[in-house]
Image (spheres, rainbow, N blue to C red):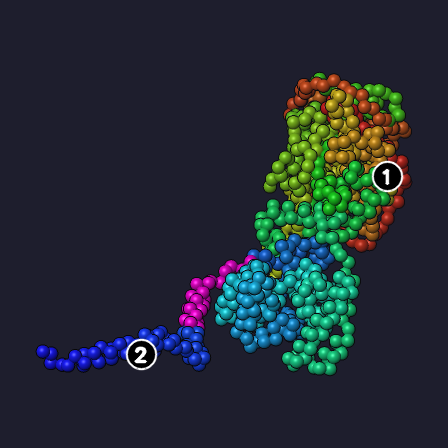
């Protein structure tokens, strides 16, 4: 029998069930026979609030941790290279007027103290009015960027000056929240490592102002033709305004742009006033209208001859040893040897003398002007606009024709001949298996005019081919001696080197000695290098290396390179004076009489080069005149097409004595206008021991007498058979002794002029036909 009554057990059981039911009900469930219980609004509110707070706290902790992680792991990168570059400036010889620039970005960085206070205040008012007090970031801008990107829109502005500086100097222009976050982190780091002053200085030297100008110095020049230090408050407000939209707010872009600029300009001035940087009265007065903008003509950086000049300079800087990075963005200051007067004289002289109706695209004229004694390239004309053709015909090779004969004469004098020694001037004349001709336009002689025995001097005056081949073939090493003399004088070999330097030619066959008829100009040379070789003769036998770069400094003025203008003796003074005398006589009595119109003492040589055609005939491929005064040497070359096309039958006259000599005269008149007149040294009349060749030292032509008649030009294009053998050379002569005295050369003429008038004369010239090309006057 149980200790407890059965009714008690039932109560206990029932109680347990009731408890279970209540428990279920309290959870919102239902028990047997119970009903569902709902939470009140207040209960829901607190439940969600607690959840949000917990979630927010977790997110904050994650973000703080992420920020700390990013701050520690994101290093300040290397600056974008382009934004650290500075413009390299190229100047004429005066060191003031600019030829052009080399630049990745047009920029000239200046120190903070060189920047006017007005531009600092204006830029802060325009871009970041809390700049001096903020931590370097704009949290609102970051949040706005994040939401904008999340919505698929582009980011908005409102970056601080520090953020903008970081973006352009270290990052890229990508618009994304990732870049924005990195920008903020780097801005905080930069702010801890740089002062506000340093940040503003870097920003003002880096930011783009439009018109190709990076940094405040370039912008001041681009908009107002001023240095940044000289900017007024109103000008500073304009430059600060255009930062917002460098193209849309450029006043040069029309009325709408000018109207928009005025609105932004007033906003900047108001900001400067509200910041206490200018008075309200000054702001109100300045807001009435924009400052005056000078008329800045759009300058073509490479147009005309400028691109040719900059190419010469760049190539020489690389030869000197400057790297492309230094040239393009090193902020160099390069003073060239070029003068504005010589450059203008070359261009204007070409335009004056060239035949009418012949375009630059077909007829190419190269002109080069070199100062004897220094090798300085003073001026040149490279042909058509650089933007239309990058071929510089002053630096391109052409067959030089009889302008090579002076170097044959120098080699002959060195070998022991004199100006009075005679050579066979008959035509045609065979040397080995090679037949050489003289030509006279009106002589009527199919085989060319025969002169008989003529002196070396007379043969130079009349450019007698056969006489000079006779001289060349009798030298100890033949054309090798001519080649060596020309190379030593300043014509570089295929690859210029320290021993035989020069400005590298851009096109044409190499100058080489593998040519029996080198004396007739079968090899090719550029006007620049040929002018420098003649400058050696003009300078008494002392060669100076031709160059276009005189001095290079860095932006601070430290000299990095200075041309030495050293000279090397390559022929004796006596030989140089005799060759120079022969060239003076060529102008006075021979094929170069067109140069008499200069009305100053002058020496020179004509050249008309022939080239073999595909049918075995020949045609004229180039026409030259190279001449000089004691102070300046100028070479003029006429070519056509690719430099090898036919001139005869196309130009009204193709001889060097006509258009090239006339062009030389017009160029030199302008280039030497106002210069003091100087005389050449007297001839030495070298008379050494000549090779035993049977040459008669008694000339058939008295050196200082004027012949009563001279043959005129004739055009013949008759072909001749091809031959390969070369003549036998003579024995080695006794060298001519070297004269020790040197004449004084004036590298830069004085401004005072004394004019010597000489009688005018009509130009006449002689050309020659030889096997596989050649030349004459």
- Crowding at dot 2, Cα within 10 Å, few <14 / some 14-19 / many 20+, comes out as some
Q: Residue 260 at what x, y percent from top left?
A: 73, 68
In terms of secondary structure, where does tag 1 sit? loop
Q: Residue 557 at what x, y percent from top left?
A: 62, 60
Residue shown at the point (81%, 28%) measured from the top left: 767
Q: Which residues are magenta?
A: 55-80
The residue lying toward the viewer, choosing from 278 and 579, is 278
Residue 452 is drawn in which quadrant?
Answer: top right
Residue assigned mark 2: 22
Q: Compared with residue 299, is residue 225 higher up or lower down, i.e. above or below?
A: below
Q: Compared with residue 267, is residue 411 higher up or lower down, i.e. above or below?
A: above
Labels 2 & 1 near each other (Cβ < 8 A):
no
591 horizontally vs 338: left or right: right
In terms of secondary structure, where does tag 2 sit? helix
412 horizontally vs 24: left or right: right
Point out the image quarter for the C terminus.
Answer: top right
């Amino acid at each position: 029998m149980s200790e407890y009554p059965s009714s008690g057990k039932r109560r206990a059981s029932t109680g347990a069930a009731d408890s279970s039911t209540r428990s279920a009900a309290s959870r919102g469930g239902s028990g047997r026979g119970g009903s569902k219980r709902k939470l009140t609004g207040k209960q829901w509110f607190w439940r969600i609030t607690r959840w949000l707070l917990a979630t927010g706290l977790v997110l904050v902790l994650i973000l703080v941790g992420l920020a700390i992680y990013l701050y520690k792991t994101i290093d300040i990168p290397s600056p974008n290279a382009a934004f650290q570059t500075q413009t390299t400036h190229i100047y004429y010889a005066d060191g003031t007027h600019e030829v052009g620039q080399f630049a990745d970005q047009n920029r000239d960085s200046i120190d903070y103290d060189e920047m006017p206070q007005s531009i600092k205040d204006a830029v802060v008012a325009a871009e970041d009015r809390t700049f001096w007090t903020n931590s370097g970031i704009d949290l609102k801008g970051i949040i706005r960027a994040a939401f904008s990107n999340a919505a698929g829109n582009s980011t908005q502005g409102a970056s601080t000056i520090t953020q903008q500086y970081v973006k352009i100097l270290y990052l890229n222009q990508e618009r994304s929240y990732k870049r924005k976050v990195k920008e903020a982190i780097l801005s905080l780091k930069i702010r801890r490592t740089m002062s506000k002053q340093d940040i503003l200085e870097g920003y003002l030297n880096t930011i783009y102002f439009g018109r190709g100008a990076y940094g405040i110095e370039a912008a001041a020049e681009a908009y107002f033709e001023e240095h940044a230090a000289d900017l007024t408050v109103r000008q500073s407000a304009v430059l600060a305004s255009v930062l917002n939209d460098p193209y849309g707010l450029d006043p040069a872009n029309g009325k709408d742009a000018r109207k928009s600029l005025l609105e932004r300009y007033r906003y900047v001035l108001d900001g400067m006033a509200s910041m206490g940087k200018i008075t309200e009265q000054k702001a109100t007065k300045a807001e009435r209208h924009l400052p005056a903008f000078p008329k800045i003509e759009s300058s073509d950086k490479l147009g005309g001859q400028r691109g040719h000049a900059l190419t010469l300079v760049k190539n020489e800087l690389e030869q000197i040893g400057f790297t492309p990075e230094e040239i393009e963005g090193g902020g160099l200051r390069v003073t060239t040897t070029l003068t504005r007067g010589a450059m203008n004289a070359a261009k204007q002289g070409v335009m004056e003398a060239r035949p009418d109706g012949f375009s630059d695209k077909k007829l190419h004229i190269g002109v080069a002007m070199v100062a004897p004694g220094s090798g300085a390239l003073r001026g040149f004309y490279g042909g058509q606009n650089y933007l239309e053709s990058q071929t510089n015909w002053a630096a391109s090779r052409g067959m030089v024709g009889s302008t090579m004969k002076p170097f044959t004469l120098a080699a002959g004098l060195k070998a022991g001949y004199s100006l009075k020694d005679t050579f066979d001037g008959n035509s045609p004349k065979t040397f080995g298996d090679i037949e050489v001709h003289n030509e006279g336009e009106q002589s009527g002689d199919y085989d060319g005019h025969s002169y008989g025995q003529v002196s070396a001097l007379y043969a130079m005056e009349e450019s007698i081919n056969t006489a000079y081949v006779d001289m060349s073939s009798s030298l100890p090493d033949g054309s090798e001696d001519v080649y060596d003399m020309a190379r030593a004088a300043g014509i570089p070999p295929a690859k210029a080197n320290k021993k035989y330097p020069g400005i590298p030619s851009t096109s044409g066959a190499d100058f080489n000695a593998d040519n029996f008829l080198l004396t007739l100009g079968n090899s090719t040379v550029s006007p620049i290098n040929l002018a420098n070789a003649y400058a050696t003769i003009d300078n008494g036998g002392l060669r100076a290396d031709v160059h276009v770069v005189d001095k290079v400094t860095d932006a601070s003025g430290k000299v990095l390179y200075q041309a030495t203008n050293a000279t090397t003796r390559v022929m004796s003074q006596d030989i140089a004076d005799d060759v120079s005398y022969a060239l003076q006589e060529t102008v006075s009595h021979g094929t170069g009489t067109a140069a008499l119109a200069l009305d100053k003492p002058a020496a020179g040589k004509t050249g008309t080069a022939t080239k073999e055609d595909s049918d075995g005939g020949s045609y004229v491929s180039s026409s030259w005149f190279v001449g000089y005064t004691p102070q300046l040497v100028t070479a003029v070359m006429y070519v056509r097409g690719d430099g090898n096309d036919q001139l005869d039958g196309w130009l009204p006259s193709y001889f060097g004595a006509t258009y090239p000599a006339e062009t030389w005269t017009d160029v030199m008149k302008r280039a030497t206008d106002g210069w003091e007149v100087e005389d050449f040294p007297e001839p030495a009349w070298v008379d050494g021991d000549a090779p035993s060749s049977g040459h008669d030292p008694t000339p058939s032509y008295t050196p200082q007498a004027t012949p009563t008649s001279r043959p005129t030009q004739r055009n013949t294009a008759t072909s001749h058979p091809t031959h390969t053998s070369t003549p036998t050379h003579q024995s080695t002569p006794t060298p001519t002794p070297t004269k020790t005295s040197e004449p004084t050369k004036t590298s830069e003429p004085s401004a005072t002029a004394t004019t010597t008038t000489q009688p005018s004369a009509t130009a006449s010239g002689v050309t020659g036909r030889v096997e596989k090309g050649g030349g004459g006057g």
